Amino acid sequence: MRSRLLAVLAVAVIALGGCSAQEPARPGALAVGLVEPGTLLPADVDDPAGLLVTGALWTPLADYDPVSGRVTPRAAASITSPDRVTWTVKLRAGGRFHDGSPVTAKSYVDTWRTIAGEHWAATPVLTESLRAKDISAPDDATIRITLDRPANQVPAWLSAPGLAPLPASVLASGDWTGFARHPVGNGPFRLDGDWQPGTGGTLRRVPPSAGHPDEVDLRVGDPVEQYDAVRDGDLDLTTSVPGERHDAMHADFTDRHLMWALPRAGYLVFPASATRFADATVRHSLALGADRGALANGPLAHQADPAKALLPPSSAPGERTGTCRPCTFDPAAAQSLLGQARFTGPVPLYSDLGGDGWTRTLASGLARTLGVPVTAKQRPSAGPVDGPSTVELKLVSPSPADVLGELAELAGYSDAGFTGDLAAAEAAATPQEAGQLYRVAENQALRDLPAIPLWTGHGHAVWGPRVHDVRATPFGGVDLAELTG
């Protein structure tokens, strides 16, 4: 989302002291390993572990598939609009929070007003993407949204997991810290007791469902130990595979492992202040000189794939084939372009704290490939920079408009054709037409290259033989409600 760049792959992990020493899951329960979530307040979650847990505790209004544009209603019965300006959300009957209170249209309206006033991860979905002139609840089952312009991305934005409703009790108290210790959602599981940092918590299915576990024990621990515990039969499933176990995964779990796209991606962004890099030929040279495989297999520890396009898989409309030209590693072409531009360096690469590891690897690789000085530097706390910056985007909605818009804002990129294509895509009458126009805008940005795509994140899971039906989505991770075993 715009204005929410975070640099990083550093996740604080609290070790269990050996997963193999843990008690096995109780009958009717599954034991699932994860790292410590950053928070369990859904509107502020931006990490895979947090998305996993809140995805079990809440049911979103809808699921949105950016490839097809298909909307699958969940807590909503329908999301419709006659003109793409006024939108009506009809809620399914009987929705309740785990504390027994009803989930009404007012629950959503009051929650969204609170989110809009906070500085949470999901705030830009409302304030920068949706930009509604008015949101109201004419009755308990109806949400009415009036926009300031036609926009077909409303179902994508409303599917953002951070827009989950909060009970009136916490909205009244504002005790977000206390609520994150014991979140109360509207989803298929409730949390039994408080979340215990460093240990985890127990999810209980509401109501029970035949063929599915009634209980899921979430166990916080070290990913290496959890991987070994699943392999040794002491844990049913773990939701991360560390780099040092990545190669072994295919042999240890031949048909019991899964990888899926995460809503995170890394870029090299050229701000308008970096005037020495205004020539697109120089930017294309840097793009072709970037060894993305070295990043994915090195400092990113097999938790990412080399980028194949500007839009990451979690937000890309339509089926994708091949790799974009600026996404390929071609040292000879990179050197040739740099010579044509008569660019001799130096190249400063700026990064935020946390992204300095992969920035240093990128800098040293570019220096070897291009034969010019390339130096990784810490981004100053204020003021413009004179070179490109590495950026990690952590996305909170599947809309391609958010990715393209944020990259343009970070770079100060204002090409008229690109801006017009974005506006036309947002106002398009059908998802198919919108997808084509977002691709046109993406291709324009790839020609001008205000931002170089470098990598896209992916998640992992491995599981034991008694677990079945393991599926995952970018914005929810492993679907705990669908597991059987």
Image (cartoon, rainbow, N blue to C red):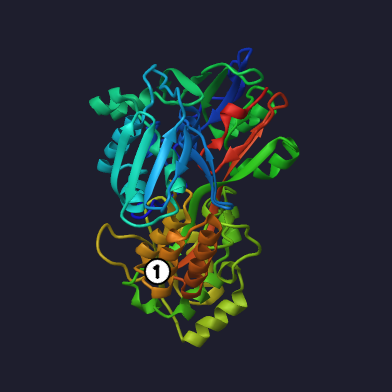
Question: Where residue 229 sits in the image (x, y, percent)?
Answer: 64, 27
The answer to whether 73 is drawn above or below residue 321 in the figure is above
Out of 426 and 30, give the one closest to the viewer.
Answer: 426
What is the number of callouts on the image?
1
Q: Who's the residue at 46% across and 42% down the image?
A: 79
Q: Who's the residue at 57% across and 16% down the image?
A: 208
Please identify the quarter of the rendering in which residue 331 is found.
bottom right
Q: Is residue 203 left or right of residue 469?
A: left
Image quarter where the C terminus lies is: top right
Q: Residues within 10 Å of mark 1 (few under 14, many from 20)?
A: some
Question: Where residue 386 sits in the image (x, y, percent)?
Answer: 33, 71
What residue did someone put label 1 on? 419
Question: Where residue 115 sits in the image (x, y, percent)?
Answer: 30, 39
Out of 76 and 158, give the one closest to the viewer.
Answer: 76
Q: Is residue 367 left or right of residue 139?
A: right
Q: Who's the residue at 33% across and 53% down the image?
A: 128
The answer to whether 18 is drawn above or below residue 436 in the figure is above
Please identify the quarter of the rendering in which residue 306 is found.
bottom right
Whether residue 112 is visible here, answered yes or no, is yes
Out of 341 and 87, give the one closest to the viewer.
Answer: 87
Task: Tell me the element at label 1.
Answer: helix
The answer to whether 41 is drawn above or below residue 98 in the figure is below
Whether residue 13 is visible here, answered yes or no, is no
Question: Where residue 184 sits in the image (x, y, percent)?
Answer: 39, 23
Q: Who's the residue at 63% across and 43% down the image?
A: 259
